[in-house]
Amino acid sequence: MKKTMLGLAIGGLAAVPLLAAAQFAKPEDAVRYRQGALNVMGVHFARLGAMAQGKMPWDPKAVADNVAVVEAVHKLPFTAFGEGTDKVSGSKAKPEIWSDRAKFDKARDGMFAAVAKLSQTAKGGQEAEIKKAIGDAGAACKNCHDDFRSR
Ligand code: ASC
């Protein structure tokens, strides 16, 4: 019985990367998915930004909660910039995402690294360190938006 439960648990874990690498029936579905994930990330990151800039009171519990959401969501949009999704109307994604993919991937990896650092710092770091990590993660968001998102 124990073995079976363990087998199920491991099977469940193995399924996670498959789920994360979401498949989409139509390019429109992928665009909606990435916009949704980016929107959720933006809402929670904006709360962190507001606290880091003193526009909202610094609240360690709210920081931890919002960092957890950003951490959970930040990789999801990048499963949804596949072929054909550059042709969908109503997207701000610039053609350079597909014509200069190496640069796009580098910007993505910079954001992943900044979020990893933020996550780590938020667990027990000093307020000033966490604020710096929020600033650095925000700069990574902006870095990619400057080059790859139209206004
Ligand atoms: C946000 C948000 C972004 C980033 C960026 C930081 O809250 O929605 O895209 O922060 O503006 O510079």
Image: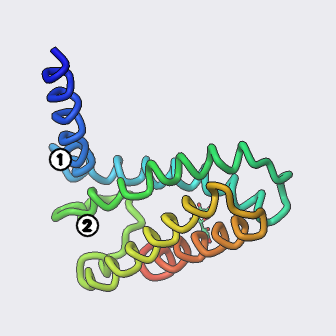
Residue located farthest toward the top when viewing the structure as drawn? 1
The disc at residue 23 is 1
Instruction: Quarter of the image for the N terminus: give it.
Output: top left
In this view of the protein, which residue sits in the foreground, 21 or 93? Answer: 21
Depth check, mark 2 against mark 1: the one in front is 1
Q: Residues within 10 Å of mark 2 (few under 14, many from 20)?
A: some
Badge 2 marks a residue whose secondary structure is loop
Residue 150 can be seen in this image? no
Q: Residue at x 25, y 42 (%)?
A: 16
Badge 1 marks a residue whose secondary structure is loop
Does 35 appear above or below 84? above
Q: Residues within 10 Å of mark 1 (few under 14, many from 20)?
A: some
Which residue in the protein does label 2 denote?
86
Q: Along the horizontal axis of the image, is 93 left or right of 140?
A: left
Q: Residue at x 17, y 26 (%)?
A: 8
Q: Residue at x 48, y 64 (%)?
A: 116
Q: Along the horizontal axis of the image, is 145 left or right of 25?
A: right
Q: Which picture quadrant has residue 54?
A: bottom right
Q: Which picture quadrant has residue 45?
A: bottom right
In this view of the protein, which residue sits in the foreground, 146 or 63? Answer: 63
